[in-house]
Amino acid sequence: MSTLRHLAFLKAEQVREIQGEFGTPTFVYDQLLLERQAQLALGFPNPFGLTARYAMKACPSAAVLRILHRQGLHIDASSGFEVHRALRAGIPPEHLLLTAQELPGDLERLLDLRVGVNACSLHQLEQLGRLHPGRRVGIRMNPGLGSGHSNRTNVGGPSASFGIWHTHLDQVLRVQAEYDLHIELLHSHIGSGSDPEVWQRCAHLSLEIAAQLPEVTTVNLGGGFKVGRMPGESATDLHRAGAPIAAELERFERDCGRALKLEIEPGTFLVANAGALVCSVADIVDTGEEGYRFIKVDAGMTEMLRPSMYGAQHPIVVVPPAGISRSQGDFLVVGHCCESGDVLTPEPGNPEGLLVRTLYEPRVGDVVVIGGTGAYCAGMAAKNYNSFPEATEVLLAADGSHHLIRRRQTLDQIVANESIPAFLTD
Ligand SMILES: *Cc1c(COP(=O)(O)O)cnc(C)c1O
């Protein structure tokens, strides 16, 4: 595991260079891998046309958005703020689709800009109808089944609040009629699984709903295509996952006479393995003969929550200085936060448990690379906990050059919005 072969897309000399030039912790994203994944997504089987959207919450950096958009991907935004962030990154409004738990305060303006909006609840559908009667809209349905590697990533089925429950279609039709809405897009994102059978069932259930919505021209099956982060884990084969979906769409066309366009919205699949976190060994401690040896790194839940939240597994490699060889030992790797849950080597799927990794014997200051950190890390961290600044982000360009794409936050920026009431200032 600890061998330098598992440094994701980086080479040992590159990570030492990044440590020296940008300091740590620093996220590094690889342009070529982003582009390769984008092309795989755009090759998803589809009989009647495809739009692939990047679910930008996975890694919302403007540089990443631009790289993926240039490849031909549109964008899935999860909040009004994400919509504005994408617009600032130069994404045209008509390439944006908002699918949010909470509609933004400036919804009217976004509609005027021609940003696509999915109603994710009956209340949202009413809101859209009241603002823009006669408008073309999408609806997100919960088709009644879910898929995900844990309850926390499962966004379909009876225990998920996402989308309109499938048996409430009569109420959808009532709101639609009241405001003369045109439901052209049917959306269902059920979570992150890799089982082609689940995808097929989801497509089938979605199409059963589409059959009752005659104006639907597009079905969007969301994202959730699994990738392998750890050595030996495999990624979703999009051709295998997509073939039965394409077959369902063809059957629908034969039965209902409507050729529906397909949309997919991968997040993880596009970026997870195109990102690595370069950090440094801050300390090495142990809890005696019967205990553990711990590597403390200068990153943690402030950069990545997935291990402490899901028990997610990320490859971790200690990189000794050039020309130095080290033996290996068993270690737990922990983050720098004053929080016992800040563990980077939990038991798989169990954030309460611990599992040692075999790694090179570390010294303070050695580089540590944590792989598979392109998705849901920089964008989903315990930002500023313990007042640690947001990490630097660097892009490794196709020509091998690296570029700063986000500076490390400063203390001034961390406290910029605070104020002290006058009565506390004397
Ligand atoms: C998060 C999300 C996605 C992407 O999920 P991944 O598991 O990262 O592929 C797609 N669509 C919607 C609506 C989402 O909320």
Image (spheres, grey):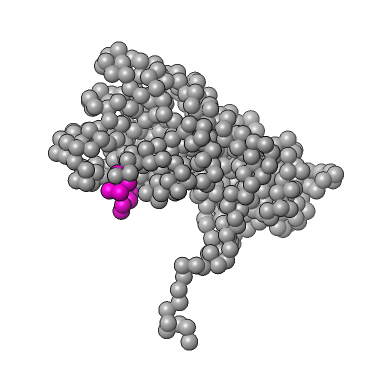
Query: Residue 348 sits in which quadrant?
Result: top right
Judge whether residue 133 can be spotted in this image: yes
The magenta stretch spans which residues? 102-111
The residue drawn where x is 27% and y is 30% is 184
Is residue 367 or residue 109 the one in the foreground?
A: 109
The residue drawn where x is 47% and y is 23% is 44
| Residue 24 in the figure: left or right of residue 181 | right
- State whether residue 234 is above or below residue 94: above
Instruction: Give percent across and percent down for residue 56.
Output: 46, 42
Instruction: Inspect the magenta stretch and tell me whether residue 407 lies in it.
Output: no
| Residue 401 in the figure: left or right of residue 65 | right
Is residue 140 or residue 21 the one in the foreground?
A: 21
| Residue 90 in the figure: left or right of residue 156 | right
- Of all residues shown, which one is farthest toward the top? 254
Instruction: Give percent across and percent down for residue 140.
Output: 31, 36
Is residue 13 or residue 382 the one in the foreground?
A: 13
- Of all residues shown, which one is farthest toward the left? 178
